[in-house]
Image (spheres, helix red, strand yellow):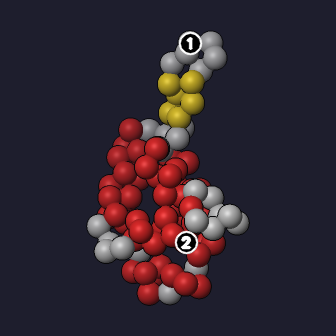
Amino acid sequence: FNLFNGIKDHLKVQLEVFITSVHLRILSSSISPQTRERVWSSSPEQRELALESLVEFCRENMLMTDIYLNYDCDIKCTNLFETICTT
């Protein structure tokens, strides 16, 4: 994360892709139409690692505020803060 923190202004798209394609994809689930049960896209261990990593991101001063301001308030980006909070 220190790499992103140091040059985050130049890596806005890359940070968005990293969080959505790695962390949020690991944490995603769906409902099976046949059984109506939740089906996870990854193992419990993978989900635990992804959550631990997101917790580390959240420990950085101002990161969540920056994510909200730079992604959710930008019409060209995904609502990253909202997606993290609702996942």
Please give the name of the residue rendered at 55% of the width and 84% of the height, measured from the top-left corner: 9
Q: Which mark is residue 35?
A: 1
Disc number lying in front (2 or 1): 2
Residue 72 placement (x, y as % from top left): 56, 62
Instruction: Place residue 18 in its image quadrant.
Output: bottom right
Q: Which residue is mark 2?
A: 70
Instruction: Place residue 45 in its image quadrant.
Output: top left
Residue 16 can be seen in this image? no
User: How many numbered marks does the figure carry?
Assistant: 2
- The answer to whether 76 is drawn above or below residue 2 in the figure is above
Residue 22 placement (x, y as % from top left): 54, 56
Please give the name of the residue rendered at 44% of the width and 87% of the height, measured from the top-left corner: 6
Quadrant of image for the N terminus: bottom left
Residue 64 placement (x, y as % from top left): 40, 65
- The answer to whether 51 is drawn above or below residue 17 in the figure is above
Instruction: Identify which amino acid the numbered label 2 is placed on.
Output: Asn
Please give the name of the residue rendered at 51% of the width and 81% of the height, measured from the top-left corner: 8
Instruction: Identify which amino acid the numbered label 1 is placed on.
Output: Thr
Residue 8 can be seen in this image? yes
Please give the name of the residue rendered at 49% of the width and 64% of the height, measured from the top-left corner: 68
Report the side of 19 relative to 44 (left or right): right
